[in-house]
Amino acid sequence: MSSHVIITGAGLCGTLLALQLAHRGHKVTLLEKRGDLRKEEMSAGRSINLALSDRGLAALDLVGLRQKALDISIPMLGRLVHIKGGGTTMLLPYSGRAGEHIQSISRPGLNALLLDAADEHPSIDILFNHGVQYADVKGARVIGTKGSTSETFDLTGDILIGTDGAGSEVRNGFMQIGSTIRFNYSLQWLDHGYKELEIPAGAEGTWQIEKNALHIWPRQSFMVIALPNLDGSFTVTLFLAYDGTPGFNHLNTDQEILKFFKDEFPDLVALMPDLIADFKHHPTGALGTVKCGPWHTDRALLMGDAAHAVVPFYGQGMNCSMEDVLKLDQCLDEVSENWPKAFEIYNAGRKKDADAIADLAVENYYEMRDHVDNPDFIAKRAIEMKLEKKYPDYASKYNLVTFCEQHPYSYAKEKGNRQDKWLLAYCNQTDTSNLSEEELERIYKALKEV
Amino acid sequence: MSSHVIITGAGLCGTLLALQLAHRGHKVTLLEKRGDLRKEEMSAGRSINLALSDRGLAALDLVGLRQKALDISIPMLGRLVHIKGGGTTMLLPYSGRAGEHIQSISRPGLNALLLDAADEHPSIDILFNHGVQYADVKGARVIGTKGSTSETFDLTGDILIGTDGAGSEVRNGFMQIGSTIRFNYSLQWLDHGYKELEIPAGAEGTWQIEKNALHIWPRQSFMVIALPNLDGSFTVTLFLAYDGTPGFNHLNTDQEILKFFKDEFPDLVALMPDLIADFKHHPTGALGTVKCGPWHTDRALLMGDAAHAVVPFYGQGMNCSMEDVLKLDQCLDEVSENWPKAFEIYNAGRKKDADAIADLAVENYYEMRDHVDNPDFIAKRAIEMKLEKKYPDYASKYNLVTFCEQHPYSYAKEKGNRQDKWLLAYCNQTDTSNLSEEELERIYKALKEV
């Protein structure tokens, strides 16, 4: 039976969802508060590339867009660590198995791909410049204004799905009836913020540092990362505390900014001619985790960042949000398009996985900035690579999260953390430089049992 | 230096705060969205009596209202447990020391006492029917409407303090600038709700059950409590899951309601002639915990339930909110009325205590309904009474929370939980029916060390 579904937010999750629900035979009205990003200039300094991996790709398979997404991506085969004294480590691969890597992709580029496909579907009506200001999550109704005009809209569907991001207005609708459905909500900020900068392309669109890597400059209590773009540039992100020394609150003058970068990241200073101007003009972004639930009434559902905004340190926010669409699709199959039932089993099954990736993302922040250049951590990663190469059914925590979409995030977190604990203790007590095949076999068996 | 302070919410915390700030020489505008409760009929079924204890009384000392509050209270010397088969246990006293007990007090009665005092103070301007709809917490400004009219008000003070309860509009002002001050917020609901009922007064205003006790009917996964009122009646509260069997969602018909009470609380049925009508007409309330922070900007502060709404199971919500006023007063002393500095040290010192009482209140729910009639628990309480009687410097967890206002809640929680763990293990392994004085001394010393 065909339903009229209102989706708020034409980002990655909302547009993919619109496509898949249209494929299922529903009529979709897709509301987006901003203009059409394919026609507008992007504002600088707001997460313009992301790491696409297997869960996101599996979701794109739903609508046949995997290859088109890969075509606009750059493979990142591992982490390249930039040491404080200068120079880099060897590339630390993301997996011991060939073909298991992540992709750097432009967020607006991928979004445009999805919007182009949605444009072509006759059952999808995309309304840009439609910002929701009030959502009735029991009545599947939204009220808002068109662009910056005073012209209002008032729409009621059979179903309302909020994919309107971390600051979701549909979620506010759930909070307004909070005590009647006992809607739990939590927003926790990190003490660290982020700032986006850029390494411009080299001559003739070449990449000035290794193209096929995710670059990290770990400095214990703060770090810089860089992801490659198709045009030869890199998007560079500094993660740093607001307060404390160093801290964003103490980097105000040109001198302060330049001294900080020269002391900590001298190699970057040479690569970023616009460093000081970018630093001063790009906003400092805050990093928060949203957990909430139940995500549904009988007629409304929250998905993507609206349901579970996570910090970016596992590269899974986008992948998780797109996987949401895959999971909802399976639930709709399971109960033959009975929406309230589908929402209920989706919520029951998905909540623990959203919580798990939220926690993993915070944990990985500490790993990336504090441990990625630690000897035990490096020894552990070397063993993980050997195990992944030799044993097809072994997967490290990172591998479980990133490349094993057959396992839910909650499994990846639990199994992965047990493996990590065992391996770190092992590396701390053992000289791992010359492991025999028998010893590797022993480790493999021990990790199966943890 | 005198400031103009806007306080939103003329409840217990807000009115006490208004009085104390006026005593300090400030000019106070006290806004209350409802009408004057001294002139209006109360709506039935909303927490009309509360347990006043030492922290609340110490705060009332600030404004000289302790005795007036005690004059309208009924001492509750302990818990009287009503067993399922019928009959009660011996009274389980709240302390082994004379004079340490809690008071049942009418919430509107205490509020009226505070409002009467505020009326008399020339520096306090109380504006009833002034509901805040927007708060600018950086500018100490509030906008709202008067009563149910369309007449608006727009006020700016030097300082804005939100004491507008669990659903605080001033807190929404903090959430609106959330990412800039990294305002963490969490609201978590219990799976259980509550319903208020009544045992009416007996002939000539007598109490039909023991007057000087807090009555409990513990039934493992649910419970009823009753607190005495001055007029001879008792306010009775059922705490029960929404879903499950039994659960509020399955108590709809007269038959279902009556059967549930007859099966579980036959003695109560006889005492409550209006049981079924009250059950059907009084709302089912939800029970939530709000944690948030930082509670302040340079010009605005959250206090009371607006900052830390807790579930009612430790009888500390009101006491904690009034103690907030005492603590802020000390901070203002400490920094000679420097508001931003006072807010900062208040927040730094008070947050862990608000978190502690929130957690204790949830923990005590399980204790009250599951353990209060458990043999080890009863043995433990008996030892605690003996210890409190013999050793002036010993205090059980309940005693630390309720009667030891010199210790903060966080200390009470940590020390109290360590003592509980030790004592429960002891009671589980030992026959405690005939403890020698030497053994009691050994226990006393062991508990000092935990």
Image (spheres, coloured by chain):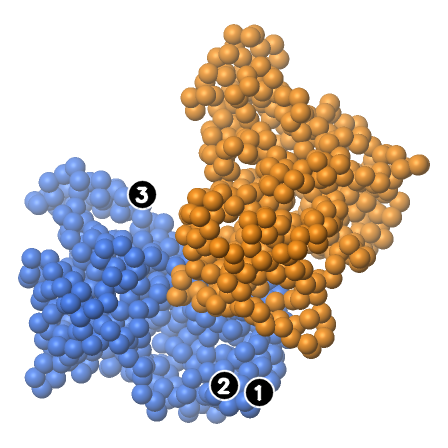
Chain colours: A blue, B orange
**Could you say which is closer to the camera, residue B23 or residue A149?**
B23
Whole-angstrom CA distance, mark 2 to mark 1, is 8 Å
Residue ID for mark 1: A153
Crowding at mark 3 (Cα within 10 Å: few <14, some 14-19, many 20+): few
Whole-angstrom CA distance, mark 3 to mark 2, is 51 Å
Please give the name of the residue rendered at 65% of the width and 60% of the height, measured from the top-left corner.
B125
Same subunit, tags 3 and 1? yes
Image x and y of residue B264, in percent: 77, 39
Res. B236 image quadrant: top right
Q: Amino acid at mark 3?
A: Val
Residue ID for mark 2: A130
Reading the chain from its start, which is encountered first: label 3 or label 2?
2
Instruction: Indicate the chain on which mark 2 is placed.
Output: A
Please give the name of the residue rendered at 47% of the width and 61% of the height, measured from the top-left corner.
B299
**Could you say which is closer to the camera, residue B19 or residue B373?**
B19
Crowding at mark 1 (Cα within 10 Å: few <14, some 14-19, many 20+): some
Res. B182 image quadrant: bottom left
Q: Amino acid at mark 2?
A: His
Reading the chain from its start, which is encountered first: label 2 or label 1?
2
**Could you say which is closer to the camera, residue A328 or residue B447?**
B447
- Which of discs 3 and 2 lies nearer the camera? The answer is 2
Per the rendering, the mark at residue A162 is none
Whole-angstrom CA distance, mark 3 to mark 1, is 56 Å
Rendered-image quadrant of the N terminus of chain A? bottom right
Q: Amino acid at mark 1?
A: Phe
